[in-house]
Amino acid sequence: MPRTFPAARRRAAAVLLTASLLLTACGGARGDAGDKARAPAAGYPVTLDNCGHEVTLESAPRRVVSLDQGTTEILLSLGLADRMAATATWTDPVMKGLEKANATVPRLADDNPSFERVLDARPDFVTASFVSTLGQGGVATREQFEKLGVPTYVSPADCAAGKDNDSGGDGSRSAPLTLEAVYGEIRDLARLFGVRERGEKLVARLQARVREATHGLDASGTSLMYWFANSQSPYLAGCCGAPGAITRAVGARNAFSDTHDEWPQINWETVADRDPDVLVLGDLTRKSQTAESAQAKIRFLESNPATRNLTAVREKRYVLLSGQAMNPSIRTVEGIEQVAAGLRDFGLAR
């Protein structure tokens, strides 16, 4: 997902954290004095390697702050709303079925919150979907949280083998992302929270949905183009992120499969040359780019001289996806279902 949210505001006070702030953060991580006398929780400590960081929890988190929508929806799907202190950074309404649970969790910000605001929530664990969220220019680095005794976790989909987050923009991938990275995140979080059985059941449900959506589907010869946001310099999906996983699942072809950047900005003249059969449009509710909603994208496509004669535009072959479905997340499965249904509706799948 193109991440254009403003960098966390770092006031001078954040550089010289006061003793009271340190105590607040440490209190959130370690609990009250009574906790010290308790025996270690059953099944803990738990240690795992996460994006090159060793994460160790002495007990199940009670006040997790989730800094990206993707990891938030996994936690909610695992039934962990009562252990969530806060969330942040949203592109879409919460996934259907999670509305009631999500309403019980405070939202710090629609975009990246400041480091101080996260600490004010007294987290004992912090999660994120993207390396950049817990990196330089994001909310804070993992090291900043860990110095205060707050363990952190980043979605393995964003640091999987072949993902280069230092290549500019949203990074690039030399190897295709698979849904196993998403399933791995579910299993990691379920293990860290001591709810492994819930994690396995969630993975099994997602796998069953993929099998059902793609059963008997053959869309070979059909080309898809994924447009996330921005009408002037559109962010279109390269070969190997979540849209690539969707495309492979339905047996189609990505019009920009020769591009390894996660979300390259490609001009409309090049799009016209490729003339995709189907346009998969991000239907976002955030306001940080132009042409965020699907309707705004369609208005642009049908009025712009460079795009109005595209085959997909003339035939109105549009599939609308949430921004989260275009990210490596549990909603990528939703994306597979919707793209598969669209291809069948358009008569482009056998």
Image: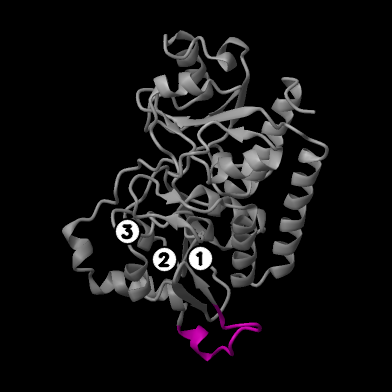
Q: Across the whole image, how many numbered discs are drawn on residues?
A: 3
The residue beneath circle 2 is: 122
Q: Is 183 or 95 nearer to us in this picture?
A: 183
Amino acid marked by disc 2: Arg
For the residues labelled 1 and 2, say whether their Cβ atoms are less than 8 Å apart. Answer: yes
Q: Residue at x 74, y 67 (%)?
A: 197
Crowding at label 2, few (<14), some or many (≥20) Cα neighbours within 10 Å?
Answer: many
Disc on res. 115: 3
For the point 61% across and 28% down, the residue is: 223
Q: Quadrant of the C terminus?
A: top right
Say if 241 sits above or below 316 in the image: below
Calculate the distance from the C-alpha at mark 3 to the C-alpha at mark 1.
16 Å
Give x and y (percent) for residue 25: 37, 71
Amino acid carrying label 1: it is Arg
SS at mark 3 in the image = helix
The reply to whether residue 121 is in sight is yes
Residue 10: which numbered mark, if any? none
Query: Label 3 crowding class (10 Å Cα cut-off): few <14, some 14-19, many 20+?
Result: some
